[in-house]
Amino acid sequence: MARGKPTKGGRKAAPALKEEAADKVVFYHDWCKQCNICVSFCPKQALAMDAEDYPQLVAPEQCNSCGLCEVLCPDLAVTVPGRERRSEPRPRNRKHDGGEAR
């Protein structure tokens, strides 16, 4: 597998995985500096480092596609295709920016 292309569910997708499980998390190993942040902060412990110290999805059934790994990655080396993204910015809390409370 070429290292410049994203891999589905980690370095190698296990043949026993269903296609939708392998698409939960995509890693770009050429961008990854192997910092382990995605693995350390996964709330479901669905990620682990492989033998070459790259992150991989080891428990796709536990992954809830929260996207925390994607958001915390300093190198933008992780994407979660099924993550719900906000199309509009969150409303500001006017109480904290000098305005009146709602």
Image (cartoon, helix red, strand yellow):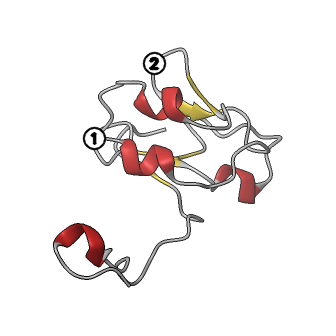
Residue 81 position within the rendered picture, expressed as x and y whole percent measured from the top left: 54, 63
Please name which of the two marks, 1 or 2, marks the residue nearer to the observer. 1
Residue at 38% in and 43% down: 72
* Residue toward you, 98 or 30: 98
* Residue toward you, 38 or 49: 38
Q: Quadrant of residue 57?
A: top right
Q: Is residue 69 left or right of residue 91?
A: right
Q: Is residue 34 left or right of residue 62?
A: left
Q: Is residue 16 left or right of residue 35?
A: right
Q: Which quadrant of the figure contains the C terminus?
A: bottom left
* Residue toward you, 10 or 81: 81
Can you identify the residue that label 2 sits on? Answer: 53
Residue 56 position within the rendered picture, expressed as x and y whole percent measured from the top left: 57, 33
Can you identify the residue that label 1 sits on? Answer: 74
Specify the farthest residue to the top: 51
Residue 73 in sight: yes
Q: Amino acid at mark 1?
A: Pro
Q: Amino acid at mark 2?
A: Asp
Q: Are marks 1 and 2 in contact (CB under 8 Å)?
A: no
Q: Residues within 10 Å of mark 1 (few under 14, many from 20)?
A: some
Q: Quadrant of residue 101?
A: bottom left
Residue at 69% in and 46% down: 63
Residue 18 position within the rendered picture, expressed as x and y whole percent measured from the top left: 80, 52
